[in-house]
Amino acid sequence: MRLVGPLGAASLALAGCGVLDSGSDSEGAAAPPPPTSSSASAAAAEGGARAPAGNARVTPPGTRLRIGQRAVVPYRTGTIGITVTAIERGDQAAFQQKFGSRAAGMTPYYIRYTVQNVGGTDLSHSAAPLLQGVGPDGGSTGAVVVGGMPGCDRTLPDRSFASAGATYRTCRLQAASAGRTVAGAKYEDGEYRSAPVVWMG
C-alpha cells in the first residue's frame, strides 16, 4: 500500500513526488492529468469509428461519459467494457487508521465500477483495469492512493472471466486533498494515456 500526498506540498509525507510504503503494491503512480477538452460526446460510450469488438464499438480516446455509461476499450489481449457505477466518499476513520498521520488533510473516495468481458478472450488471469480520480473540472484531486482498504478492495476476476458477457465488480480507493473532491474518474491505459476516457457525475 502506498500513499502519494497532496501535490505541491513541501514535506515528504505530503509531497506530490513522495511515496510512502506500507505494503507491496505494484500498481504504480498516477499518470498525466486528463485532457481539458473532449474529442467525443458522452453519447459515444459505444460509438465512434473504431473497429467493433464483439457487438460493441471501441470507445474513442478523449470520450466523456456520465456515471453509469460504459466505455469499451482494448485491454491486455482482449476487449473489455468499463462502467463506473458510483463515486462515494469513503470511511474517514478507517482511512486514517490505515495511513495514520500520512492521511492528514486527505479525504478518501471509493470509485466503484463493473468490468465486462466484451471480446471473449480469456482474461481470467488479468488484473482489474486501473481508474484514477479527477476533480470537478477533470483535473487533479491533489492526492493519489495506490492500494485498497476494507470496503474498497481491488477485486480480481475469477475463472469465469474467460468468455464474452462475463462481469465482475471492483473498487478503486482514491483521495482528495483539503478543499478538493473526487468528482469523476478516468481511464488512461495504453492508447488512452494522452486522451483518457473520463466519467463525471
Image (cartoon, rainbow, N blue to C red):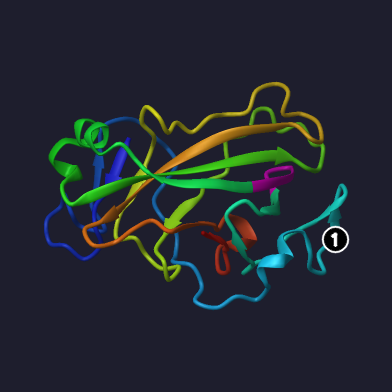
Three-letter amino acid code at the position of disc 1:
Ala
Q: Quadrant of residue 139?
A: bottom left
On whether residue 77 falls in the magenta region, the answer is yes
Residue in front for this viewpoint, 119 or 29? 119
Q: Quadrant of residue 27?
A: top left
Which stretch did the figure color magenta? 75-82
Can the viewer see residue 6?
yes
Instruction: Say which residue appears at 62% left-offset and 62% top-offset.
Output: 65
Secondary element at tag 1: loop
Q: Is residue 59 left or right of residue 201?
A: right
Q: Which residue is under mark 1?
A: 51
Quarter of the image with the N terminus is top left
Q: Where is residue 113 drawn, in percent x and y? A: 57, 42
Check disc 1: other Cα within 10 Å, few if <14, some if 14-19, many if 20+. few
Instruction: Say which residue appears at 78% left-offset and 43% top-offset.
Output: 118
The prevailing secondary structure element of the residues shown in magenta is strand
Q: Where is residue 57 drawn, in percent x and y? A: 81, 58
Instruction: Say which residue appears at 20% left-offset and 36% top-offset.
Output: 96
Q: Is residue 158 left or right of residue 164?
A: left
The correct choice, above or below, for 38 with respect to 174 in the image is below
Q: Is residue 5 left or right of residue 124?
A: left
Q: Where is residue 103 drawn, in percent x and y? A: 20, 44
The correct choice, above or below, for 79 with respect to 6 in the image is above
Residue in front for this viewpoint, 179 or 76? 179
Instruction: Say which residue appears at 57% left-offset and 29% top-offset.
Output: 156
Can the viewer see residue 60?
no
Q: Is residue 189 left or right of residue 139?
A: right
Tag count in the figure?
1
Q: Where is residue 23 drawn, in percent x and y? A: 31, 30
